[in-house]
Amino acid sequence: MYSAALSAIDGKSSRTFAYTFGDTSVLYTILVSRIKGLFTRVRGLNKDFGDFEGDLDIYHLNTHSMASHDATNMKALENQAIADGCLLVFLFDGIGGDHHLKVEKEDHDELVRYIKQKESQLWVSPLAKIAAFIDASKH
């Protein structure tokens, strides 16, 4: 029902999802059993890298929360992902301001500039496009 309503608005037929606050269950009900087939990929909160060559858990992709990280730390993660050829998903709860899970705006801006410098070594894309690429490469 919701997918049809969203599709009527934006014309998209595939969607990704992120577990709110990383919670994978609600009132003892495991969400993955309820959402299977509704989304192409689901972002979790495990701090790890996705391995394109191995089996990615499409209903719990590893995501790095950047809460309170500085530019040096974020760039180090980027460098590791480049060196290992892995999927790196950043999660930003807030940029600047008074949010307690924020990244300072200056650090975020520095990361964006760094990504621009490294763009020949990276692929920055919406998760739905990355999911389609992974699916196509397995066939």
Image (cartoon, rainbow, N blue to C red):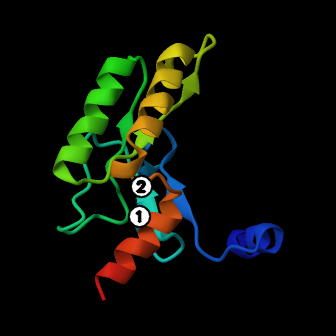
Residue type at the position of mark 1 = Val
Residue 90, compared with residue 84, is above or below; it is above
- Relative to 36, is 124 above or below? above
Residue reaching furthest to the bottom: 139
Is 92 rendered above or below residue 52? above
Please tell me in which quadrant of the rendered image residue 60 appears.
bottom left
Location of residue 51 (image quadrant) = bottom left
The x, y position of residue 105, in whole percent, is 56, 17
Residue located farthest toward the right when viewing the structure as drawn: 9
Front residue of this view, candidates 6 and 125: 125
Across and down, in percent, residue 123 comes to: 41, 55
Using the numbered discs, state the Cα–Cα distance from disc 2 to disc 1 in whole angstroms.
28 Å
Q: Which residue is mark 2?
A: 123
Q: Residues within 10 Å of mark 1 (few under 14, many from 20)?
A: some
Q: Residue at x 30, y 22 (%)?
A: 73
Q: Which residue is mark 1?
A: 32
- Decide which of 112, 86 is in the foreground and name it: 112
Q: Amino acid at mark 2?
A: Trp
**Sooner in the amino-acid sequence: mark 2 or mark 1:** 1
Residue at the location (65% across, 77% down)? Answer: 13
